[in-house]
Amino acid sequence: MKNLRKDNKGFSLVELIVVVLIMAIIAVALAPQILKWVNNSRISSDNDTMQQLISNCQTTLTNEAAFTAKPASIVVGNTGITTPSTISGNFFDKLAEYTGVTTTNLAGAYKTKVNSATIQITIDSKGAVTGVYSGGTVDN
């Protein structure tokens, strides 16, 4: 039994360095793919935010007090909603109510994950709500 313990010296420094180098090479090779996955995830999250905002705007327009907001446009960036002066306060009050946030927190409730991206929600004169996402690209 004691002979086995004397022969067990563990890993040599050279073996450890080789393993660390192999791990570094693998990490460098996978980094671009991982960055694409992260970017695609952020763009997907932005598209989900746009769909949620469109749905909430459509629900808000069913309320008579908010119906006077059309035509209008809402722009969302990475800092939150830019509230144009063409939209009445009633619309944002009702949008905040249907979203589940306070009116003061509504501007920050929706944000894009991609820094250069914007979401533009447009409400036409008939009350149709459309959204356009720009600034982000999906990598394949």
Image (cartoon, rainbow, N blue to C red):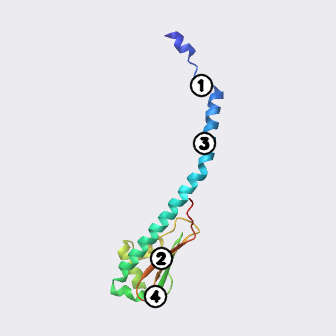
Residue at (52% x, 13% y) in the render: 4
The answer to the question of whether label 2 and label 4 lie on touching residues, with beta carbons closer than 8 A, is: no
3D distance between C-alphas at marks 1 and 4: 72 Å
First along the sequence among labels 3 and 1:
1
Residue kind at label 3, given as amino acid type: Ile
Residue kind at label 4, given as amino acid type: Pro
Q: Is residue 56 above or below residue 28?
A: below
First along the sequence among labels 1 and 4:
1
> Element at badge 3?
helix
Q: Considering depth in this image, is 32 or 59 the residue closer to the camera?
A: 32
82 sits left or right of 129 in the view: right
| Mark 1 vs mark 2: in front | 2
Residue at (63% x, 25% y) in the render: 12
Q: Which mark is residue 86?
A: none
Q: Position of residue 134 (x, y in %)?
A: 55, 72
Name the residue at the front extreme. Answer: 140
Label 2, on which residue?
A: 131
Label 3, on which residue?
A: 26
Label 4, on which residue?
A: 71
